[in-house]
Image: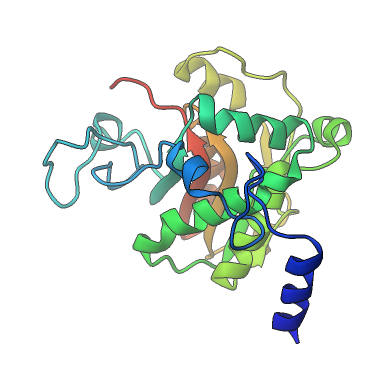
Amino acid sequence: MVKLFNQFLNFVFPPICPICGDAVESHGSLCAKCWTGFNWISNPKCFKCGYPFPADLDLGQHPMCPHCAAGENDLDFIRSACVYDDVSKNIMLPFKHASALKYQTIMSRAMINVLRDLNLDVDIVMPVPLAWRRLFKRGYNQATLLARPIAKHFNAVLDVDSVSRKYKPDMGHKNAKQRRENVRGVFKILNPDKIRGKKILLVDDVMTSGATFYELNRILRKAGVSAVYAVSFCRVVHTI
């Protein structure tokens, strides 16, 4: 029945690439030309945070970036599907700020794909919370839209109410240290019994310095969470 409905849907609304409008095989897919325009993150990369290394480097089976090697990342794993650049931001920013929800499927699929090699055992998928003021203004939390199909993929609970966030102005062009200071204390655990002992996957659209993930990890660990992973669609790549 579902197959017939999808066939009917494809007949009435032929699937097209959400970026360029060319015909594709299924809804939410990219055409080959648009797909190759993204800087997808693959090996070699940091085993812990997924930071991409130059393709010609042979760094062994489990290479680590200087930040993770120095113990600055306490999450179990972080992964991002692609690098934040002119191509990725042209879908991420409209999705985040301008209700361009047509990009949700390709973004969440890419995030699921980048997690496949980790064989994660996830109890809870948690989108990074928005402050109520920002949620009211925007009308939706883009991280929640991305987290919903990811939770379904892992057969995990989608948790949007165990952590709240206080409003603070955007971090803009702050450096990594300033971002950590700015986000310190903005999150509050509301339902500790729901998350205690659980393995949680955090979801966000973009990772800039990692400050948001690090702060969430800090308070979740204090609440007794047993493992914290994180995934974003894209990440800013700085020279290490």
From the viewer's side, name the closer residue of 129 and 105: 105
Residue 86: x and y in percent read 52, 24
Name the residue at 50% across, 48% down: 231
Q: Residue furthest bottom?
A: 1
Q: Is residue 73 visible?
A: yes
Q: Decide if residue 62 is on the left or right side of residue 135.
A: left
Q: On screen, 125 above or below 220?
A: below
Residue 99 lies in what quarter of the image?
A: top right
Q: Decide if residue 62 is on the left or right side of residue 22.
A: left
Q: Is residue 189 visible?
A: no
Can you say which quadrant of the picture contains the C terminus? top left
Name the residue at 67% across, 49% down: 104
From the viewer's side, name the closer residue of 190 and 119: 119
Q: Decide if residue 98 is on the left or right side of residue 82.
A: right
Name the residue at 50% across, 27% down: 208
Name the residue at 21% across, 37% down: 55
Q: On screen, 89 above or below 4?
A: above
Question: What sort of colour scheme is used for the picture?
Answer: rainbow
Residue 220: x and y in percent read 56, 49
Give the number of marks.
0
Can you say which quadrant of the picture contains the N terminus? bottom right
Residue 239: x and y in percent read 31, 20
From the viewer's side, name the closer residue of 144 and 11: 11
Residue 230: x and y in percent read 49, 48
From the viewer's side, name the closer residue of 102 and 195: 102
Q: Decide if residue 176 is on the left or right side of residue 150.
A: left
